[in-house]
Amino acid sequence: GKMMRRLGQACRRQGMGLNVRVRNLATPARFHAASSAKPLPDPHNVSNQLDKETIEAIVKRLEERGQCKTFRSLFNYFHLIPENAQVLEVGCGTGVMSRALSKYEGFNGEITGVDQCLGFLDVAREKAEEEGCEMGKITFVEGDAHDLSSSLSSDSAFDVIVMHTLLSHATHPKTVLRSAHSVAKDDALLIIMDGDYPTLSYLHSEPWMGKQMDEALINATFNKPDIIRHLIANLKSCGWNLQDTKGTCVAEVGNEADYWVSFAECYTPRVKASGLMSSDIVDQWLEDQAENLDEGNFFASCNYYTLVASKAELLDTKKLD
């Protein structure tokens, strides 16, 4: 539809003008940096170092996908969370999941969201108030997922820990899992939801361009794109026993799409800035995707998995990452 024609202008979009806080660092990891010989870092991995324009672009993506029916279907684990649970969301971003859980029928517990990006946290608090969340039961805290005990009060202990699309961006996923173990109650649940991003694929009439753009988007966006495959084997050494898994294919087909449209809008500029693909090819790919939408031929998909684990003895305290 008309909204989808914006794909062709993704690389020329201007900032949203949101009032977000940014750390004053000497060498920020810029989203729209000049082309370089190697990919820029995963922007979510260095979200505490990003410039204002980048934060605004990512905030827009997080909030748009948060309103997307496709994305919200991935909250398929809410029913597993006890009514009065103390819940920790690690890597909460703008708090989309935490806000949704706070309003979930049957949930009356308390939620703490942790993120390393002050700009994201400011938006999380603002949106929570705007949406009428009970602010006494939802808190957002600056902290490092790799060292949660240092970010939270010494008596913090949680019934449920959620990592919703976090570990694919983490530097050391197993360190994050051990960090979560340190702030979990003895009978705690760990819920991990993330994509198996090597399966990400957009339809394109030129197979070579389609394949290379898929790979470029994956490399520009995710620090550990295939982490979900490795978690199965390594949860136990990090103090968690796998209890259940569920797989979901997130696909948009035809002439209506928003989840994969906003993904392309947000991250194709980083493909350009990294020098992973030339600007001309990226622009052509965007125009072709817009045409696919107009003609009802759009296709994009990726597999996502939810893993549920229970706290167990921490068998191996060595750093394995």
Image (cartoon, rainbow, N blue to C red):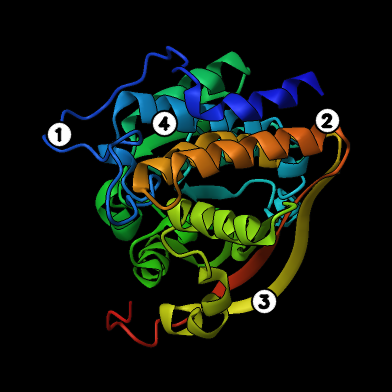
Judge whether 40 appears above or below 224 on screen.
above
Instruction: Judge by depth and name the residue closer to the eye, 50 or 74.
Output: 50
Say which label, 1 or 2, has the lower sequence index: 1
Q: Earlier in the sequence, mark 3 or mark 4?
A: 4
Which amino acid, by three-letter code, is at mark 1? Answer: Leu
The one nearer the camera, 287 or 131, is 287
Give the residue type at disc 2.
Asp
Residue under label 1: 25
> Residue at label 3?
243
Q: The N terminus appears in which quarter of the rendering?
A: top right
Q: Which mark is residue 294?
A: 2
Amino acid carrying mark 3 in the image: Gln
Helix, strand or loop for disc 4:
helix
Left or right of residue 97, residue 255 in this image: right
Q: Residue at x 69, y 47 (%)?
A: 83
Residue located 56% across and 70% down the image: 228
Residue 82, percent from left and from top: 68, 53
Q: Are marks 3 and 4 in contact (CB under 8 Å)?
A: no
Q: Nearer the viewer, mark 3 or mark 4?
A: 4
Q: Secondary structure at mark 3?
A: strand
Which sits earlier in the primary sequence, circle 2 or circle 4?
Answer: 4
Check residue 63 in the rendering and tell me which mark sits there, or answer none.
Answer: none
Which class describes the residues within 10 Å of circle 2: few (<14), some (14-19), or many (20+)?
some
Give me the C-alpha separation between circle 4 and circle 1. 17 Å
Q: CA distance from mark 3 to mark 4?
A: 32 Å
Cα distance between the residues tagged 2 and 4: 33 Å
Q: Nearer the viewer, residue 220 or 98?
A: 220
The answer to which of marks 4 and 1 sits earlier in the sequence is 1
| Residue in the image at 53% along x and 26% along y | 60
Mark 4 lies on residue: 120
Q: CA distance from mark 1 to mark 2?
A: 43 Å
